[in-house]
Image (cartoon, rainbow, N blue to C red):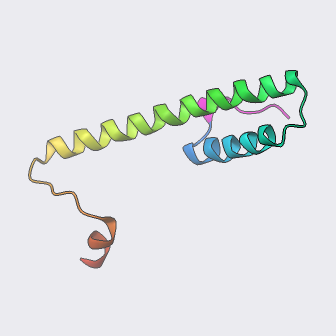
Amino acid sequence: MAKKKPENLSFEESMTELETLVTQLEQGDLSLEDSMKLFERGLALSQHGQQTLANAEQKIQVLMNNDEQAELRPFDDAESDS
């Protein structure tokens, strides 16, 4: 089965696959060619994850700038107000 392109995966799917790749690479029983393929895939997944986080951070910054009176609070405080 062909693997999805990193950009078609959710952040969580990317991180789960990346964790699996790291585990496989750490075991050290792969050929050099297979290790390089996994490393390349892992790099693409990592870059996708970093881009996803950067986009989320940018959206949060835009939202916070739209409401300059907004106060950052831990999620627990927001839930207890309900």
* Residue 58 sits in quarter: top left
Q: Residue at x 27, y 69 (%)?
A: 78
The vertical placement of 38 against 12, above or below, is above
Tell me if residue 63 comes above or below residue 73 in the rendering: above
Magenta-drawn stretch contains 6: yes
Query: Left or right of 7: which side holds 35?
Result: right
Report if residue 77 lies within the magenta region.
no
Q: Position of residue 36 (x, y in %)?
A: 78, 23
- Magenta-drawn stretch, dominant element (helix, strand or loop): loop
What is the magenta range?
A: 1-8
Residue at 10 percent across and 47 percent down: it is: 68
Residue 9 position by quadrant: top right
> Where 79 falls versus 56 (above or below)?
below
Q: Determine the residue positioned at 29% across, 64% down.
A: 74
Q: Quadrant of residue 70?
A: bottom left
Residue 82 seen by the camera: no
